[in-house]
Image (spheres, grey):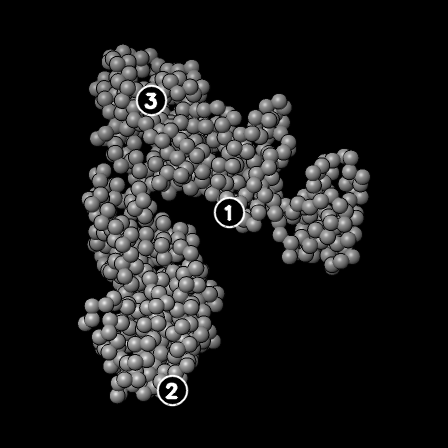
């Protein structure tokens, strides 16, 4: 491995921890020593801080009818949202809807419910732009439908589902609870979170620490807890609270949601720089990410090279990008999302994903592109 | 498209206050300026019968919301300011009414400058005529969809369609200061709000009996007062160490009289503190008959310790009415957090609802409460809760 600086372009998998957020974590660990459920003064002090942190999260998302449930991350938040709703409201119907392009922490939960718990699942297809078709959703809804889970921004392609339109359709079906996995959306696109019943957020995608997440839940919805116990988090997620984690995550959310438009403006030219290069070399690359997607993610395929070889060669040069998503890259050799967009086998089997963050610079991107060019033109297959 | 550029602030009851009016307006202007200090582009102009807030491009909605919390304001209108030239007024009125939804309209004109060449009715006719010729709206003077108001004043004309209700009452500060008894329950913050709404500033007195009451209650009090800070930006909180007095009462008084004697001690302390802090009145969240110490007979016996007026703004309200206000001002969810207060510990099984004064005096004669009161006042702990406090020391 060369000693030069690492160029990190895999921010959809994990972001670098912001030192300010780490500082908060450390400060809270040192100054707030008690379990917030304890009734002594230190306990009350910790509980008060955590309450302020919760309120800050709601304020940042402009939510007044929701509450915050801290979780161990997005996977737990997704599991809680999906199973918690399905089990709680199974008496109202047993049909649930999602899409084929969801993150594994959603898809696999639906598969469990389908195979082990007698729920009927509709997996909506995605179109060539990587998003669901509103008409497909309308057709899928039946009297039995109680739950819809759709991601805001696809983690592999950056494609943006029409959440606003979906929410307005679902609002005509008061029985249906709407969950959005917003992991790749927070601080990256602008949307109105208040129309959604359940929202998943992950800390490590917004420069906070790993293993922390939030499920935002509309107050009037009940969830069957996955973890029963001491009744923390309003009884929905038992387990002693990690005050430092919650508070630092609250800060990360505040920073992520501050001035999103200018972050988008910063990222756009970097995205454009990559796109221009890929378009100029159309014999080598095919872009999978649609034009109107989140500018933070650009997914493309190698027309006649092997993606894993390119990832390895770039990695050896200190440039970190991803093939498919990190979450299942070790398991499967192809991208099920890109496959679902209707692409050919060579394309969906050889996808690369570059995901950006405001810490990346124009020169990072230039160096990445020149290295990519050399690597792709230099290897045999 | 034409946009509203000012907010017209109409005064509450103070329009009737004769010579004091100037002070009232000045205080209101100070309060408004403070409340709006987070909006750097606004400009505030004070005139004899209105205050105008020039928006200078600021979104009006958050500004109106802030202004609606300020006491002493009767109503607020979103206005367009233009010259008194008839052609300009016609054009502005037409452009504004085009933005509104509805089929019918009515024009209300007020000419406060009586030297203006046209009288109100003539102005109304001119402008209505222009609107009727230009777009397909109808006039309905009884139930119009759109109410277009025009005020011709000496300096300019103001045109508006939207008026919002203010909080009413008097500007905070013109009513002087009250020593307010704050327990942390539902009623006392509501009573505090009602006092503020009437223009009275408050200082708060809270009785703490550690270890019977929890020190963590301070977070509850802080949150309550921070919520009230939107009406009064700085609130001083006096925390009285009450344990020794409370223990002495339970050693010396009959159980059924403990609450009566305790309330008398509290009012003695509040009274001394009120005098020290130059508050001519005491206020509390008591409501007639709600608990044993709040029956009229109890109030009579308890009140006997002082001549200082004790104002009880919630006295005649039902609990549901009090709760409704507490929800509106945002204190309800904080108030219901579970904490013991001085009144709920040692609760006797059968407290007296009609205590006798001679009995009370006998019990009080059995111990030297004067020394204990003096000692408590020496050890009072003071906190100041302010609107722009950094609550979390930069952590968040």
Residue at 70% x, 43% y: name it: B157
Tell me the tag on residue A283.
Answer: 2
**Which residue is denoted by mark 1 in the rendering?**
B62
The N terminus of chain B - image quarter: bottom right
Expressed as whole percent of the image width and height from the top left, the position of residue A342 reads 38, 84
Pick the front one: A133 or A206: A206
Q: Are marks 3 and 1 on the same chain?
A: yes
Label 1 sits on a secondary structure element that is helix
Label 2 sits on a secondary structure element that is loop
Q: Is residue B149 above or below residue A106?
A: above
Tell me the tag on residue B266.
Answer: 3
Q: Are the two marked residues, 2 and 1, in contact with CB atoms closer than 8 angstroms?
A: no
Chain letter behind tag 3: B
Residue at 30% x, 46% y: name it: B395
Q: Is residue A140 above or below residue B126?
A: below
Nearer to us: label 2 or label 1 = 2
Label 3 sits on a secondary structure element that is helix
Residue at 20% x, 71% y: name it: A2
Chain letter behind tag 1: B
Q: Is residue B5 above or below residue A133?
A: above
Q: Specify the quadrant of the image occupied by residue A378.
A: bottom left
């Amino acid at each position: 491995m060369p000693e030069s600086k690492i160029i990190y372009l895999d921010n959809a998998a994990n972001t670098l921890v912001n030192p300010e957020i780490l500082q908060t974590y450390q400060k809270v660990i040192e100054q707030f020593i008690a379990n917030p459920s304890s009734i002594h003064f230190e306990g009350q002090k910790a509980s008060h801080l955590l309450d302020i942190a919760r309120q800050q999260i709601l304020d940042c998302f402009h939510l007044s009818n929701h509450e915050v449930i801290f979780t161990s991350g997005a996977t737990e938040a997704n599991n809680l949202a999906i199973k918690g709703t399905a089990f709680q409201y199974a008496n109202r119907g047993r049909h649930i809807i999602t899409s084929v392009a969801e993150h594994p922490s959603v898809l696999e939960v639906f598969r469990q419910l389908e195979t082990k718990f007698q729920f009927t699942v509709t997996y909506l297809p995605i179109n060539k732009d990587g998003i669901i078709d509103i008409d497909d959703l309308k057709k899928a809804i039946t009297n039995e439908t109680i739950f819809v889970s759709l991601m805001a921004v696809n983690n592999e392609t950056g494609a943006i589902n029409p959440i606003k339109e979906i929410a307005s359709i679902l609002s005509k079906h008061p029985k249906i609870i709407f969950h959005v996995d917003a992991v790749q959306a927070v601080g990256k696109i602008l949307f109105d979170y208040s129309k959604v019943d359940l929202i998943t957020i992950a800390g490590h995608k917004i420069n906070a620490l790993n293993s922390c997440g939030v499920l935002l839940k509309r107050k009037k919805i009940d969830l069957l807890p996955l973890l029963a116990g001491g009744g923390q988090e309003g009884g929905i997620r038992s387990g002693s609270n990690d005050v430092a984690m919650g508070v630092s995550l609250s800060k990360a959310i505040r920073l992520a949601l501050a001035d999103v438009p200018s972050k988008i403006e910063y990222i756009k030219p970097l995205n454009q720089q990559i796109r221009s290069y890929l378009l100029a070399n159309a014999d080598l690359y095919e872009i999978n990410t649609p034009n109107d997607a989140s500018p933070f993610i650009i997914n493309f395929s190698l027309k006649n090279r092997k993606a894993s070889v390119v990832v390895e060669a770039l990695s050896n040069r200190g440039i970190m990008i991803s093939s498919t998503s990190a979450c299942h890259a070790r398991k499967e050799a192809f991208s099920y999302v890109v496959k679902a967009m209707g692409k050919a086998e060579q394309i969906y089997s050889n996808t690369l994903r570059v995901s950006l963050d405001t810490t990346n610079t124009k020169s990072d991107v230039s160096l990445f592109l020149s290295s990519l060019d050399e690597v792709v033109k230099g290897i045999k297959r | 498209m034409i946009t509203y550029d000012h907010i017209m602030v109409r005064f509450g009851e103070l329009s009737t206050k004769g010579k004091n009016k100037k002070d009232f307006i000045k205080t209101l202007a100070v309060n408004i300026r403070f409340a709006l200090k987070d909006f750097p582009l606004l400009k505030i102009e004070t005139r004899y019968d209105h205050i105008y807030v020039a928006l200078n491009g600021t979104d009006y909605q958050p500004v109106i919301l802030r202004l609606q919390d300020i006491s002493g304001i009767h109503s607020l209108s979103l206005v367009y300011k233009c010259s008194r030239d008839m052609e300009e007024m016609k054009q502005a009125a037409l452009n504004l009414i085009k933005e509104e939804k509805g089929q019918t309209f009515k024009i209300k004109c007020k000419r406060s400058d009586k030297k203006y060449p046209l009288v109100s009715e003539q102005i109304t006719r001119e402008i209505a005529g222009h609107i009727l010729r230009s777009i397909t709206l109808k006039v309905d003077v009884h139930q119009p969809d759109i109410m277009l108001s025009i005020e011709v004043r000496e300096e300019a004309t103001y045109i508006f369609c939207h008026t919002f209700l203010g909080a009413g009452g008097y500007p905070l500060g013109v009513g002087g200061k009250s020593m307010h008894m704050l327990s942390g329950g539902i009623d006392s913050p509501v009573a505090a709000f009602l006092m503020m709404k009437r223009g009275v500033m408050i200082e708060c007195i809270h009785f703490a009996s550690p270890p019977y009451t929890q020190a963590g209650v301070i977070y509850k009090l802080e949150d309550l007062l921070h919520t009230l800070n939107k009406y009064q930006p700085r609130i001083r909180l006096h925390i009285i160490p009450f344990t020794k007095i409370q223990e002495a009462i339970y050693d010396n008084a009959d159980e059924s009289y403990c609450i009566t004697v305790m309330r008398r001690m509290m009012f003695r302390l509040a009274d001394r503190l009120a005098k020290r802090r130059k508050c001519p009145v005491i206020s509390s969240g008591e409501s007639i008959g709600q608990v044993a110490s709040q029956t009229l007979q109890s109030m009579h016996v308890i009140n006997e310790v002082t001549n200082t007026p004790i104002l009880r703004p919630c006295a005649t309200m039902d609990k549901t009415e009090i709760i409704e206000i507490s929800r509106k001002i945002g204190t309800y969810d904080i108030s219901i957090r579970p904490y013991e207060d001085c009144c709920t510990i040692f609760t006797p099984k059968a407290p007296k609802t009609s205590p006798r004064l001679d009995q009370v005096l006998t019990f009080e004669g059995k111990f030297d409460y004067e020394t204990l009161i003096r000692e408590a006042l020496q050890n009072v702990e003071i906190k100041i809760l302010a609107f722009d406090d950094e609550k979390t020391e930069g952590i968040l």
